[in-house]
Image (cartoon, rainbow, N blue to C red):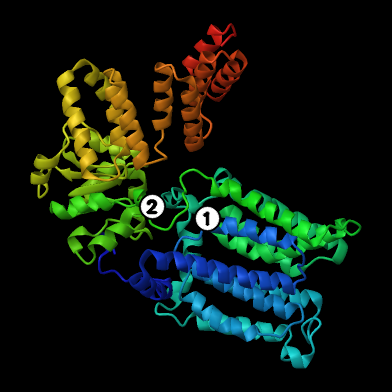
Amino acid sequence: WSWPTYGAPDVNWSWGFSALLWPVWERAGVWGLFAWRWVTALVAFGFLWGAARRMGARGFAPLVVMVVCSLVWRARSQVRPETLAAVLLAAELWILETRRQGGKDHAWWLVPLAWVWANVHNTWFLGLGLIGVHLLDDLWAGRAAEPRGASAAASGGGGWWRLAWVGLAALAISFANPFGWRALWQPFDFFLHQRNEVIFSTIGEMGPIDWDAFWRTGLPLLVGGWPILLLVRARRAGLDAAEALTCLIFTALVLRAQRFVGLYALVAAPYVARDLHHAVAARASGFRLLPGLRAALTSLACVAAGLPEWTRPGVALGVGFVWTQYPVAACDFIEAHGVRGRGFNQFGFAGYQLYRFWPDRSRLPFIDIHQAGTRADRDLYAWAQQRDDRWHELDGRYAFDYALLGRADHRSLLDALDADSTWAVVFLDDVMALYVRTAGPMAAVARAFGYRHLPAGTSRLGALAEACARDSLLRSRTAAELDREVQGSPCHSRALVLLSTMALEEGRFADGRRLLEQALAVDPNRIGAHWRLARLALEEGRPRDALREAGLERHVTGPSAPVDVVAGKAWVALGDRDRALAAFRKAAARDSSNQEARDSLRALGVGG
């Protein structure tokens, strides 16, 4: 899928997922993709709810657990192979817990489930792991003859040996995939050989949990609460060995790698639901509420659990693509102006590039979403975006003709190419920057479309702004390039913010405000736009509008010293000294180097 490795054997361990999903996308489009998410989530949680009921979960409290677990799962519910693995994991839990709780033994159903799992996702080993957990639980409980509480006729006459044969059959059938043992070896190869590579340290889902990103979902409560509920139940009813082993294994996985967050929530759901029901029932044995009141309280708890996640900035409710995540306009430019050859790209954008241009070999990405390539290439790729010498080493090895870079990340590489006269940036928008060589096959494109003044990175913006303030001709030429950026892509909020800054510096307040409002219409989460509007409102003597804009900026960026300073000045203008002091003190506490906050405190008679 990438040009340096073109023709090499491809071990596609998720081929079955692709084969199932493609007809959905082809026939139903975006709505089909969203329906896939909805259906797989509902089926998975249906199995989990059934497992929880089998285990004894009753009443309303387990419903809250299901909501919290679904919110955690939501973070991993993109249309990816994991959505199918979720259904298989939940179905396996339901089968195993039905058997363990005395229901009919459908353990042999686990064999075809294992076969499907090995052909759709590389977490297939988790299914075998759950079988092993329940086999150990059988041995722990001494059920050598029959499952607990079931007659031989009802259960099919199985015992631990039956589950052992099922596990062996599940392992054997997993090899029945187009890539044989190589597909099954992939997760172990990653753990043993690849997980410490530099490139994987840059991928958030491969590292430990980012608690700041997941606190809204209730994940900290789930990770901390499950072991506590497990131990509370163990004191009253004895240790559930299957639950304890499952909790231990999946907690270790999720703490080691964030990518297991969703599957952790799924496997925790039935056990936490059961344990919470027993804990609540024990505490409330002498206290009864009317069913209607309990239902109302449960509904309120479910809504309250969801509010932090539903109100998270940057994630609007709706059906569609978030186009600011895709290099659409940049690829339009590539296609329209004949950009091709040996291109450099960041792997996060490779999927769209392949979707757009395959099978044109002259526009294949350098690296794909699965980080295809040699160990040396992956190492150079990762370091190239942090160190100029490594970029030159990689470029010297492959002699790139163009580079397609995201503007949200890897700014050091953007700055390096901005400073290199052998490269010219020919396309810019909020999402991407496209560079081409000034010599060679792309020289004509560089001459015709190269930006002369506007950089793609950020390090040169300060010097450019100072130069524009001194030189009106340079200012008009830079404004013309910003206008070109606006015309070249629907994602152009960054250019509008810079144009508004120019307008405000020239005293054209109405134009500056209009441009900032247009930027927010393009991207409601454009960082800094509301802050600039707040400062403008202060300049124009509208302190309450400044407070409103400061609040909107804080919703986008979170706590911010510059925003607190603006809010403090607005409170000063409104004559509320106490609130002004509180705002300035917050700003100084968040950023002790903020001179404006310290000066404002001194102006109010407080040492800065």
Q: Which image quadrant is residue 438 in?
A: top left
Task: Give the residue drawn at x 37%, y 41%.
Answer: 523
Q: Which mark is residue 75?
A: 1
Mark 2: few/some/many CA within 10 Å (<14, 14-19, 20+)? few
Task: Give the residue drawn at x 48%, y 56%.
Answer: 195
Q: Is residue 283 left or right of residue 75?
A: right
Q: Secondary structure at mark 1?
A: loop
Q: Is residue 476 left or right of residue 166?
A: left
Q: Visible in this render: residue 244? A: no
Check the image and name the residue furthest to the right.
Answer: 286
Task: Give the residue drawn at x 30%, y 31%.
Answer: 515
Task: Decide: is 217 above or below 148.
Answer: above
Q: x%, y% of residue 147? A: 77, 83
Q: Which image quadrant is residue 18 in?
A: bottom left
Q: x%, y% of residue 94? A: 66, 75
Mark closest to the chain's N terminus, 1 or 2: 1
